[in-house]
Structures are given as C-alpha cells and as structure tokens.
Amino acid sequence: MITAALAMAIALTLGACSDAEVENGGKQQGLMPVLFSADNMDAGVTRASQAYMPNNSRFVCSMFFHAGASDSDDSPFAAPVSDVNMSTAWLKVNNEYGNAVYWNKEFSDVAQTNLDDYGFDPDAKCFYWQNRLKHIFLALTDNHQLKAGDGSENGTLKLFPDLTETYNGAYMKSYDLTRGSKNSMAEQPDPIRAITTMKPEGASSEANRVNLFFKHQFAQIQVNLKSSQDESAMITYAQIEKVELLGVSATGYVAYSILPDGTVPATTASPANVDDAFQMFDNNSVPTGYLKSFEAITFGTLHGIRITWHETEGELPVTHVVTFKALDNKHKNLESGMKYIYNLELRRSLIAQIKAEITPWVDDKTDHTTDGTIDTTDTNE
C-alpha cells in the first residue's frame, strides 16, 4: 500500500520514463524527475585532469527518502518500511560534462527517436523528488568496467533488492582482491561509490540537479625500485623478479545501503594472515631515476613489502629475498581512496627507503618528480 505522504503527492510525469517501484510495493510519485551529474571526484581536494565521469559510463543508484506523513529531516532512515522507502535505477553518462540519463538495466541500445524530452530511455526506471525532505542517493560502479557493467542477472551493477549480500550485519558487496589469473591492475576490481544527501529546494529539476562525487573504495599501492647508490649491488631492470605485499586482504567489502542515521558503513576487508602474499603487477609508467615500478589495488592491513631479485656471481645466479617492514600504523592500515607510494633502494640483503608518500588516489595523468614522488605543481596558474 502506498503511504499517505506518497498518496498525497501530485503525480506529474514530466518525462516519459516509467515510475520506479519502491520497497513497499507502490510507485514513486512526485513533481519532477531527479537529474544527475556524475563526477570522478571532488575537485576541491584533488587535481584530476578530467573532472567528470567519461561519456557512456554506467552506474547503478539507489534513492532513499522519508515516506511517513509526520516525518522530518531528523527522522531516522529505519523501519517501519511505510515510513522509509527506497528505489533503484540505472543510468549512463551521455555528454562530456557528466550529465546522466536513466536507462534500462541491461543497457541495451535505444533509438534516438524513441528517447523522451530528457533523453531518457522511456522504459527505464526513474527517480522523482517525493517531498521537500532530505533524499539520499547512493551510486556504485566499477571504475575498470565503466562501459561494460549492467544490471542483468549476471551483471555487476546491482544494489538492493537485486543484491542481498551481507557482511558483519550490513549490506556489503564483496570484491575478490586476490591476483588469480589477472595480468594487470586494470583487471582488478576498482569499485567507486558516491553518496549525496540533498533536498529539492529549487523550482525545477535542473535547479535540483544532484552531483555524484565518485571515490575509490579500496587503496592503491605503488612501489618504485632503484639500484643501490652505494654500489653494494648493481641491479638491472631484468634482475628484479617480483614484489609482493604481505598481509593484505583477499576480499574487500563495500556497503550499498545506508544506516538509520543516513550514513554508510565504512568500506572494510576480510581478515588475513600476516604472511599471506599478493604479487604486484608491473607498472609501465616508471618514474625517472627508477629501474622498475609495481602497482596493485588492495585493502586491509599492509604488514610488509617483499622483493625478490637476483644477481650473477660467476656463472651462478644468486637470488635475494628481502622484506621491507618499516611501516607505521598510518602506512599499515590502508585507507579507502588513498594511494601509497614507496620509493625503495635495493642494497645487497637489505632495502633502503628513500621516501614514502600517501596521497589521494586521483585518476589523472600523474607526473612524478625526479625522486619518484608526485609532482603537485599547479600548471594552471
């Protein structure tokens, strides 16, 4: 049954897309459709070369709203269902400014002549502003599958109620962080999520456009290696065999629903053994002055960095396995959305740290200084 607050809402369909079902079995009703712009990240704290999600990118989004007749902005987003509701829709970016349109969950093609006045797929589920109270929008996609994911039975773009996976008592989607048969970091899962709370205070849909700032949910680690400056070991690119991360998690979990206070549970990871090893991937962008670079997406706790390299004495190869463990808590406890850079010098039987850096993980064409750290010079000034 539709709640009293929804029943009293005026159903004025400005677009031709279908009303989205809500959790209590009713239909959304409202004055105007919700419009979205999808951004890669908050430009105020990062320096991305591309501020908006690329054209044709896909994501899934849930809208949570108060449906009780006596609800206020301070009411909890909790049971009973009749007083709190939600709906899920699928969208894709349709221009260079990140503006998104509602689309069918399979993301099948729709003839341009069949689109409605907003450019929406007429058969897509849409969101409508339900009242003047706070609405919460939670959007999720995989940054490595922006143009490949969908909401079909075997697709990756799913939220509640199509997805009901839980972890530690919360609705959490799991991601495999093991190496498996992957050959590059681009083949790893890279979930990006956006959370926006907004009230429709403007007089039109455009005035109430919702900006979704997507952020990486796991962490990225980059290890840059150079030969010994004291010449105790003269190493070439080919002699560096592999770099492994010790103690990181095999599974990461990203929340796809909200708590009663409107917040979202923090991204987390499964426990791991200290000696569990993840072999990093070769990074083709090697900073100036370094022999080789490695990269990986991971999460949990980093207990050490193990490096395997070899040298030749006479005709016999000698293999060296050394582990860097000089990590304080801020480097051990990996933080969502951050990039950890370790610039290391290989000496015989030991590792010297030149510099370690923690920086926001930004999807830009990163430039490095000669010491391997990120060049933060603002070239726009």
Image: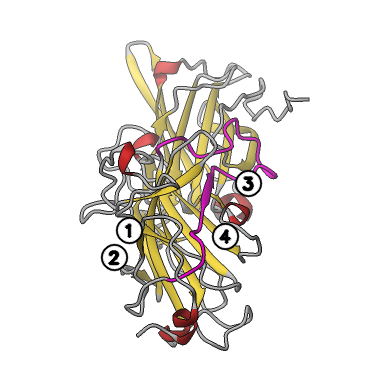
Q: Earlier in the sequence, mark 3 or mark 2?
A: 3
Res 196 label: 4
- Which image quadrant: the N terminus? bottom left
Residue located beneath label 1 in the image: 158
Q: From where the camera sits, is residue 94 visible?
A: yes
The residue lying at 50 percent from left, 73 percent from top is 65
Res 162 label: 2
Q: Is residue 47 magenta?
A: yes
Between 360 and 45, which is closer to the camera in this rendering? 45
The residue type indicated by label 4 comes to Thr
x, y percentage for residue 213? 56, 50
Quarter of the image where one finds residue 145: top left
Q: Are marks 1 and 2 in contact (CB under 8 Å)?
A: yes
Taking the view exactly as shown, the residue that stands out farthest to the top is 314
Residue located beneath label 3 in the image: 42
Above or below 197: residue 181 = above
Q: Earlier in the sequence, mark 4 or mark 3?
A: 3
The residue type indicated by label 3 comes to Asp
Count of marks placed on residues: 4
Looking at the image, residue 119 sits to the left or right of residue 179; the answer is: right
Q: Earlier in the sequence, mark 3 or mark 1?
A: 3
